[in-house]
Amino acid sequence: MLPLGMAILLSISLFHVGGHVWECFLCFSPSFIAAAGQVDGEILESLWSVLNEISPSTQNATVTSHIEMLDDHMGNSNFKKMLDISMGIVIFPSTSTY
């Protein structure tokens, strides 16, 4: 249950919203949602830059170790995002009917 006065607004990322029908673009594009944050690129692309920093340490590893190291770093990245997600929550009065 959401706290009183909080609403969740649905949106489609800018990368994908262009492939939807015009009505989806108008209703769900972050460009038209007040106070919606926007990031550059898809989330996977932002992960590659971090993985590029550790890739030299995986060059001499076995395939299994290589996969495990990358998986560990991706899991750590997801854990940090989960801890910081509350920083992105904004409380708006519930006035929308989505």
Image: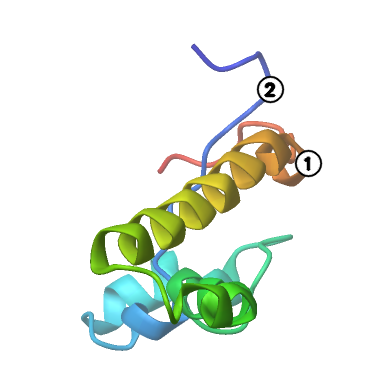
- Up-down: is 1 above or below 90? above
Residue at 72%, 41% in the rendered image: 84
Can residue 46 be seen from the camera position used here?
Answer: no
Q: Which mark is residue 42?
A: none
Q: Residue at label 2? A: 5
Residue at 52%, 83% in the rendered image: 41
Q: Characterize the local packing of mark 1: few (<14), some (14-19) or many (20 or more) Cα atoms within 10 angstroms.
A: few
Image color mode:
rainbow
Residue nearer the viewer, 66 or 92: 66
Left/right placement of residue 85 relative to residue 78 reads right
Residue 44: percent from left, percent from top: 44, 72
Q: Earlier in the sequence, mark 1 or mark 2?
A: 2
Left/right placement of residue 91 relative to residue 47 reads right
Q: Characterize the local packing of mark 2: few (<14), some (14-19) or many (20 or more) Cα atoms within 10 angstroms.
A: few
Residue 22: percent from left, percent from top: 28, 83
Q: Residue at label 1? A: 87
Splitting the image into 4 quarters, where does residue 28 fall?
A: bottom left
Residue at 48%, 56% in the rendered image: 74
Residue nearer the viewer, 17 or 92: 17
In the picture as drawn, the residue positioned furthest to the bottom comes out as 18
User: What's under tag 1, amino acid-wise?
Assistant: Met
Can residue 88 be seen from the camera position used here?
Answer: yes
- Up-down: is 1 above or below 71? above
Residue 52: percent from left, percent from top: 57, 82
Look at the image and tell me in which quarter the C terminus lies: top left
